[in-house]
Image (spheres, grey):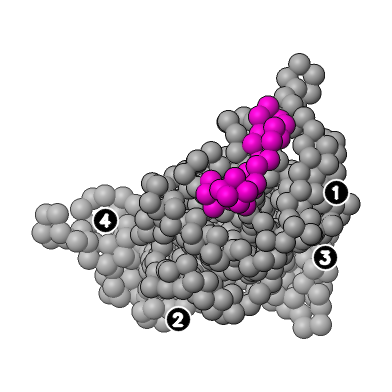
Amino acid sequence: MSQTTPAIRCNGIKKVYGTGDTQVHALRGVDLEVHAGELLMLVGPSGCGKTTLISIIAGILDQTEGDCSLFGQDFRQLPPAERVRYRGKHIGFVFQAFNLIPTLTVAENTAIPLLINGEKREKAIARAIQCLEEVGLGSKVDAFPSQLSGGQQQRVAIARALVHDPKLVVCDEPTSALDHQTGTKVMEVLKGLAMDGKRSLVIVTHDARIFEFADRIAHMDDGHIERVEARAAQDN
Amino acid sequence: MFRVALKMLFGDRGKYLGIVIGIALASVLMINQPGIMISILKTVNGLINDVSGPDLWVMDPMVKNVDDVKPMQDTQLYRVRGVKGVAWAVPFYKGSTKVRMSNGETVQSVMVGLDDATLIGGPTEMLQGRLADLREPDGIIVDKAGAEGRLAKPSPQPGGKPIPLKVGDTLEINDQRAVVVGIARATQTFASQPTIYTTYGRAKSYALSERKMLSYVLAKAQAGESPEVVARRITHDTGLRGLTSEEFKQKNLDYMIHNTSIIVNFGFVVLIGFIVGAAVTGQIFYNFTLDNLRHFGVFKAMGTPDSVLRRMILLQALVVGFIGFGLGAGITGTFAAMKANSTDLSMTLNWQLLSASGAAVLLIVLMAALISIRKVMKLEPAIVFKG
């Protein structure tokens, strides 16, 4: 893990939903740095602002106050179309509910980020199959999501998140829909493939069983980061 | 991504078929009803279309349409012949008569009397016999629809199929004998009455006694003379009304449109087809988009530009529109083709009708797409993080 290059830098991030009496302060001033090659977990109780924070980090939500940059690029300084393009090129997503398209095959689902980035279909499918082989699903490329188990679907989602070689992968509760054994396997696959020294992973979770995979864990509560613990140091 | 859009569409078979069937049914209504209306409007001019040769129709000035015959005195024929620019003019009778069948039943029929000498105004297509056979004693020519339909001889077997009239059969018209000397193809009348052709002189004897018998004068403009100019001249010189065939057809159509509720009634059904099609299609298509909203959110989060999402939805809408319209037009076209040779009133399909209904379907799917696009454009991609 490199501790020199901040891949994500958030300073004083605040997010307020609604107006007037219905205002909800989801983030109340978050400062956070994630380094290239680092796996950071955001943990905390429901409603503490974890999902809001990764949405802002991933550029799909605007903060109300504060600065957030990804590899030196502040999303808010980009025009909307450019921001979408940047996201498509540099960020991979893994969702709690997998979010695979049921009418597409596993290979087609995996190829979607490449297709979004304008890759030719044949090339995209070939690269998707390669990724699926890496996550151990080489024999399932023509299957449909409904024919796969939960763990297999999440591995497809991991392949989809990595197929376009993004700089950042954000994962929202990637193991919460899986049993412990499957969840551990999925995390092994995720960490084994995603962590190449320059890519960062931010995982939102409250599944304590997977904390062991983190480099650091940021504990959130009521819109703040209360503390950040370095797992390696703690383990030692 | 467009292939992805199509796979999403075709993958949800229930909704895909629902939208396609909705559009197909709307298309059937929007093609079929105007098609029938056009056919009805065509029957209005059936007699004029069936009469070949003359390019001028001369009539009493009070005539409102071709069926609204105001008989003139026979001497009017000679006045028309005397107008400058008229090459020739012949008498033409159009009236109604009752034909008595062998079982005693009477059938109201249209009787057309042609100039005895020239037989101008006769049917253009003879299926049996010859037009000249009208010169045989008591000769009449019956149209195919009448011969096979209302004038067909009752079957000798109770409940059996009627036997179509053929050359040599006899009928009784106003207590007088009439011999079928030919069967011709003629445009079906709106009331589906048989059409009987005979000579002008014989028509007068078949018809009930009237002081004036001349329904129309059929005339031809001399070579080099404009039929319109000659028609105006006839009107001016004789006090009658001279119209070209095209003007007479337009007059009939105008009368039908302004004095009947045909446009309103058929238009209402077309409107219902459009509204139902738009409502059903719009609703199902919108539901389809709602069902896939999460996936559109995933696409958005993953960096799909809004322009691509708009085109994906538009493609889905256009594809179902195209397939639905093709199905609807195909069903209607097949039905029209099956009825094309029938003697019953069928429907007329033309490119204008197909273009107009196609445009209506396009409007329906574009509206459906716009509503869905609006929903997707307003979608926050952060929705994907909600389990």
**From this viewpoint, which residue is outermost toward the right?**
A77
Residue underneath mark 2: B132
Q: Is residue B165 magenta?
A: no
In this rendering, the answer to whether B119 lies above or below B254 is: below
Sequence-wise, the earlier of marks 2 and 4 is 4
Give SS at disc 4: loop
Sequence-wise, the earlier of marks 2 and 3 is 2
Snapshot quadrant of residue A145: bottom left
Sequence-wise, the earlier of marks 3 and 4 is 4
Residue underneath mark 4: B101
Mark 2 vs mark 1, CA separation in Å: 92 Å
The three-letter amino acid code for the residue at tag 2 is Ala
Mark 1 vs mark 3, CA separation in Å: 82 Å
Please identify, in this view, whether the residue under mark 1 or under mark 3 is nearer the observer.
1
- Counting labels gives 4
The residue depicted at 53 percent of the width and 60 percent of the height is: A190
Give SS at disc 2: helix
Residue neighbourhood size for the residue with mark 3, other residues' Cα within 10 Å, grouped as few (<14), some (14–19), many (≥20)? some
The chain under label 1 reads A
* Relative image position of residue A66 (x, y in whole percent): 85, 39
Mark number for residue B233? 3
Mark 2 vs mark 3, CA separation in Å: 33 Å
Dots 2, 4 in contact, CB < 8 A: no
Residue underneath mark 1: A76
Give the residues drawn in magenta, as a range.
Answer: A211-236
Dots 3, 4 in contact, CB < 8 A: no
Mark number for residue B92? none
Residue A48 located left or right of residue A210: right
The residue depicted at 59 percent of the width and 63 percent of the height is: A194
Q: Are marks 2 and 4 on the same chain?
A: yes
- Would residue B4 be seen by someone viewing this image from the given angle? no
In this rendering, the answer to whether B60 lies above or below A217 is: below
